[in-house]
Image (cartoon, helix red, strand yellow):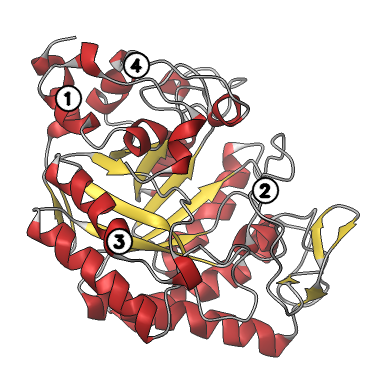
Amino acid sequence: MNKLSVAPLFQPFKLKSLTLKNRIVMAPMTRSFAPEGVPGENVAAYYRRRAENNVGLILSEGTVIDRPASSNDPNIPLFHGTAALNGWKQVIDDVHAAGGKMGPQIWHVGSLKSPMTAWEPGVPVESPSGLVGPGDSRGKAMSDEDIADTIAAYGRAAADAKRLGFDVAEIHGAHGYLIDQFFWAGSNQRTDRYGGSTIEERSRFASEVVKAVRAAVGEDFPIILRLSQWKQQDYSVRLADTPERMGAWLTPLVEAGVDILHCSQRRFWEPEFPEIDGDAGLNFAGWAKKLTGAATISVGSVGLGSDLTASFSGETAAPASLDALVQRMEREEFDLIAVGRALLGDPRWVAKVLGGAHDELNSFSAAALAELV
């Protein structure tokens, strides 16, 4: 692959107040290097290195909102409180000084435990129905007051992101965490207006979060929402098994104020609805763009030969061809591509791709999780 062949990845992108020099996004990846929730100089340097090496947009690791049980790991960064926000101010200032753009991923884990620690928050965890998944009880069902306070906390976090100088904010609504637990019938068995038998009904909480964030940041500040069909609780789950149901799920979220849908798959090249002929085998992000008209980010094992579950079970993931990605970008199936593990292990990954140094791309090993490279 030569330098010219990756040109579609290096086209500028503009949406509202956001202007990017290329289409490559650093995917949010939990790192747990923020003692007591405060990101330090090592975290700032970790993100700055990616900005220095041509990442178009950096999305931070998940950073939790101001709720008593929003975190499941004491070393996950907070996005509230003076000390943590001062730490994030250093992060964004360093990224901007290096010519980068960045947004925090604001997050509430719901009732999902971390696989990396046995730590507990010291107060009952909260979720739509006191469930992690079908038949798996943990913590308490959220009251109306809990829901209202949580929605307000998302809004405050977004307002702080804009005040600190971030370029966008991403809401984490994927992978089995709180917002996704409202989407999923397996964890949302409420009978009030935040529950229901359809995905449209169970999306009310997410829509109200988006509306609160939009009210907090104004109309010109871009809002990203990360979504997935699969859950950590069950990789086979599908919230929408037809394009019609996907449209019913996603369209109200865009109408509520989402600018960019960040569509998480385990393998980005797989068609979302393989049983449907035509549409060039669109993936999740491709269908989301087609159905809603919103800009989309695709993600899932970009640049590596195996998915994250294989890596985290100890397998080394070797570099893989970017040809399929370039082809999809050429036909504008989606607008941006998020790179996770490849960038986690190598801050120079984008610079190497741009410079044609594909033989210098690194394999990924789970050992990379133990340090901030």
**Who is closer to the viewer here, 64 or 227?**
64
**Who is closer to the viewer here, 64 or 226?**
64
Residue 132 as seen in the image, left or right of residue 161: right
Task: State which quadrant residue 158 falls in.
Answer: bottom left
Q: Which residue is mark 4?
A: 324
Along the polypeptide, which appears first: circle 3 or circle 2?
3
**Are the residues flagged by discs 3 and 4 in contact, CB closer than 8 Å?**
no
Along the polypeptide, which appears first: circle 2 or circle 1?
2
Q: Which residue is mark 2?
A: 115
| Label 1 secondary element | helix
Could you tell me how far apart the alpha carbons at marks 3 and 2 are, in whole angstroms?
25 Å
Q: Which residue is mark 3?
A: 103
Q: Amino acid at mark 1?
A: Lys
**Up-down relation of residue 310 to residue 138 (above or below):** above
At a point 28% along the width and 18% down the height, the residue shown is 327
Q: Nearer the viewer, mark 2 or mark 1?
A: 2
The picture places residue 3, in percent across and down from the top left corner, at 10, 17
Task: State which quadrant residue 53 falls in.
Answer: top left
Could you tell me how far apart the alpha carbons at marks 1 and 3 are, in whole angstroms?
23 Å
Q: Nearer the viewer, mark 2 or mark 4?
A: 2
The picture places residue 200, in percent across and down from the top left corner, at 64, 60
Q: Amino acid at mark 4?
A: Ala
Few, some or many residues within 10 Å of mark 4 (<14, 14–19, 20+): few
